[in-house]
Amino acid sequence: MDDTYKKRDFGIGLLALFFAFLSHTLFYLFPLFLEAFQPSKTRVGLIMGVYSLTAIAVRPFFGRIIDEWGPRRITFYSLVSMLFVVPWFHMVESAGFLVILLRALMGLGWGTCMVAIMAMCSDLAPRNRLAHSLGLIGVSAIVASAVGPMLAEEIVRHLGFGGIFNMSLLFVVAAMVCVLAVKEVPRTERPDRASKLLLLRKFPLAVIGIIMIMPFIHGAVRGSVLNFIALFGKDAGFDRVAPFFIAFSAAAVLARVGIGDLADRYGRKIVFFPSALIISLNLFWIAGMESYTSFILSGFIAGLGQGLIFPALSAYLIDFFGRENKSFSLALYMSLFDAGLGLGSPLFGWISDLSGYRSMYLVAGMLLLVFAVVFTIKSPPLALKK
């Protein structure tokens, strides 16, 4: 496949991810649909949470299958599964078993689709631009995450929640069309189960544990920003927090598009530590800030650090487990990150209850900084793949 064709297919692959993510983000407003049935907050949490739990659980398992069967095929199959599930939401008449089952099945399809489509897109990028391609893939998801909820509000306003379900289905179909338009890249590297056993012999378990826990810590600290910054802003007397998220998203996109190839040029660990340091110092700054201008600027700095750390750390895991296990590595990274995001939020919420949001951000910054130092010192240097 020539470079021009691969660039075209890479763009179509990003469009497929964009449509799939739009289908996913339209359901951010699903709790409003559930209000009509007057469920308890615990039941709403269960219905929304089972989606993430099934996605986290199936990713490592299906990551192995994606490596063996090829990401394009699994992407298509996972989208087909979502195609069959989404229409059933029209039949939901209570917050009972059916909606829980549907959300679990959607989580299974989405958890698989996300890994497969990222692997498919990265296969279409040059081998020596792995981190940069992962960053660009992330941009597609960021844009969809910004557009999806706004679009969902307009759909509900004009068409009701039935319109949400229909539009979600339409976006799944659009993603499937894009996947079919992409030419599958011949796989020259086959997954090797023995390669992971060799890692156990080559590296101490403590080193492997440090590498595995870093995505978890990254997710936990990211959650301290995403889940509590609005409450912190309100507590600090800031009237509007949306500009923080706009600055965050803009910086993350600019970093991934403009300098997202730094980890490819200079090494994953060389980029990882400064990006972790940026995030940590910014959290310390948030803990002590008083002005609204500083608040907005901190959003930009947080996005800059996030835009750099994700490509570097995810590419490191792929290098560590081997390119032949790329989908498994991506699945593992995303599951650990999401687990940190989910489990870290109650922890940081507990800290904020005890001593306030400012102390919470100090703890989050210190946690990331300590583990980043340990990771940088203890994780093995890996040669960049050309």
Image (spheres, rainbow, N blue to C red):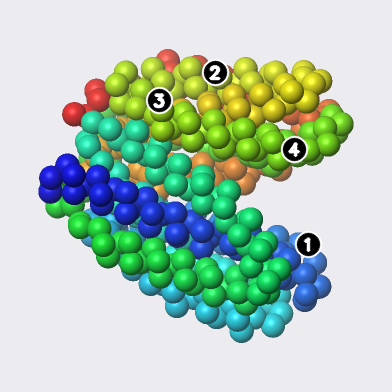
Q: Residue at x 21, y 47 (%)?
A: 6
- Label for residue 277? 2
Which residue is the site of mark 3? 259
Residue in the picture at 38% in, 57% down:
16
Quadrant containing the C terminus in the rendered view? top left
Could you say where residue 344 lies in the image, as x and y percent from the top left? Answer: 64, 39
Residue drawn 51% across the image and 63% down it? 23
- Single out the mark in the foreground, 4 or 1: 4
Label 1: which residue? 41
Residue 240 is at least partly visible in this image: yes
Say which amino acid is labelled 4.
Val
Q: Is residue 193 above or below residue 201?
A: below
Q: Depth check: give the residue in front, 155 or 252.
A: 155
Q: Residue at x 79, y 33 (%)?
A: 233
Task: Report helix, strand or loop for mark 3.
Answer: loop
Can residue 349 be seen in this snapshot? no
- Alpha carbon distance from label 4 to label 3: 27 Å
Q: Give the class, few, some or many, for how many residues have Cα within 10 Å of label 2's Cα (few <14, many ≥20).
A: many
How far apart marks 3 and 1 lie (CA) works out to 42 Å
Residue type, mark 2 in image: Leu
> Residue 257: x, y in percent?
41, 33
97 relative to 113 in the view: left or right: right
Instruction: Name which residue type carries label 1.
Output: Lys
Distance in Å between CA atoms under marks 2 and 4: 24 Å
**On residue 241, which mark appears?**
4
Real-space Cα separation, disc 2 to disc 1, in angstroms: 37 Å
Nearest to N terminus: mark 4 or mark 3: 4
Within 10 Å of the Cα at label 4, are there few (<14), some (14-19), or many (20+) other Cα atoms? some
